[in-house]
Image: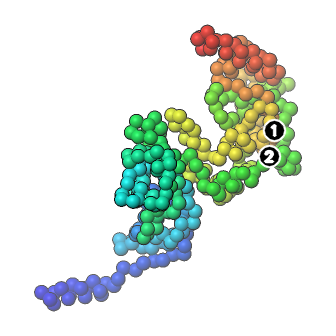
Amino acid sequence: MGRNNKHKRGARNKRGPVRSERRPSLTGRVQLHEHSAYVITENGDYKVMGRGKREIMDGDTVAVSIKNSPHGERRAVIEGVVERAAISVVGTYQTAGPLGVIEPLDSRLKADFFILPEDTSADRLGVHPGDAVVAHILTYPTRLESGTVTIERRIGGDDAPDLGVQYVMARYGYTDSYPEAALDEAEGLSLDVSAALKDPLRRDLRDRFVITIDPVDARDFDDAISLERTPEGGYKLGVHIADVSHYVAWDGHIDLEARHRTTSVYLADRVLPMLPERLSCDLCSLRPDEDRLAFTVDIELDAQGRVRHYDPYPSVIRSRVRMDYDGAEALLVRAGAVEYSVLEGAAEDVAAAETSREEALERGLA
């Protein structure tokens, strides 16, 4: 039996050990799943192996090395965290002796966070065991130590009206905060029309009658239109989109965070914008009577509405009127839904349509 075992061991040794192929360090973004983690890099996506999963959170930028697993699969080994995506965690407060414990609502996070005995945030905010809270991360988990937090805000108990939304945000990795680097980058941006117009491709369209049409409760206005008659009896439709690319540098902090978010998220009681508010609600919001950089497509239509020509280019615009859908519909109804040229000089009509809508609302007819 001993010889047989020795023979078997020898056979394994003869075949040789499993070789690990170590590649140069790559940088990528962490994507957590319920039972696994991946790092998304420019060279491909790699599953995370080893204990490094304890120190990463969804969206983190990490340095990794790529190795071959015993089964020949290429896996990512976490070498270190380059930049943290989350600065807070949503969870349930508990106690463990002198320590406070935050159990994350996001089930993809397997490690709890601790509140140190000298931290009085729970008492100060009236937090009791079982309450849901938002906690600011002081130190992040490592392979050997747990992370620590301090409580920022009490959401409430099981009956808290905010709890359901907070759970959805935590479960799907949504956050209403941005990495400090992205916020700092956004605050450093400014509108400089004169400098922008030095670009020979950018055209000054501030003399056009441009309007936005959005929901009545919209906070940002990122697209606008203009319309005018052509000498041939057709129309020139201008579609103007906020020129986000002018402000967002490729591979910058804002760009990387926007890629991670992929889109703005509309929840029951809030909007989680893809871009920081400095952009989404200011520089890239086409508010009335303010100069804004845009990307325009002029579309020439014949009298039957068929496209004859189009011309895309960067521009500077100045919205004249902010309309909502009901106001736009009322204006089209008044115009017979045919003469769209009313938009060319109808600021008074727009105001009248808005007044009519308000009166209808007061009578309970809208």
Q: Quadrant of the N terminus?
A: bottom left
Splitting the image into 4 quarters, where does residue 203 fall?
Answer: top right
Q: First in sequence, mark 1 or 2: give its number.
A: 2
Taking the spot 37% from the left edge, 54% from the top edge, the residue there is 95
Tell me the element at label 2: loop
Across and down, in percent, residue 338 comes to 71, 16
Rendered image quadrant of residue 51? bottom left
Determine whether, in the image, residue 174 is placed left or right of residue 307.
Answer: left
The residue lying furthest to the top in this view is: 363
Residue 38 circle label: none
Q: Quadrant of residue 354?
A: top right
Q: Is residue 342 above or below residue 108?
A: above
Viewed as shown, does residue 327 lie left or right of 53? Answer: right
- Quarter holding the C terminus is top right
Q: Residue at x 50, y 63 (%)?
A: 140
Query: Which residue shows up at 51% across the image and 63% down it?
Result: 139
Tally the marks.
Answer: 2
Distance between the Cα atoms at labels 1 and 2? 9 Å
Task: Describe the element under mark 1 as helix, strand or loop.
Answer: strand
Q: Which residue is mark 2?
A: 191
User: Label 1, on which residue?
Assistant: 291
Residue 116 appears left or right of 307:
left
Q: Amino acid at mark 1?
A: Asp
Q: Is residue 44 visible?
A: no
Above or below, 33 against 9 in this view is: above
Verify CB contact (< 8 Å) between mark 1 and mark 2.
yes
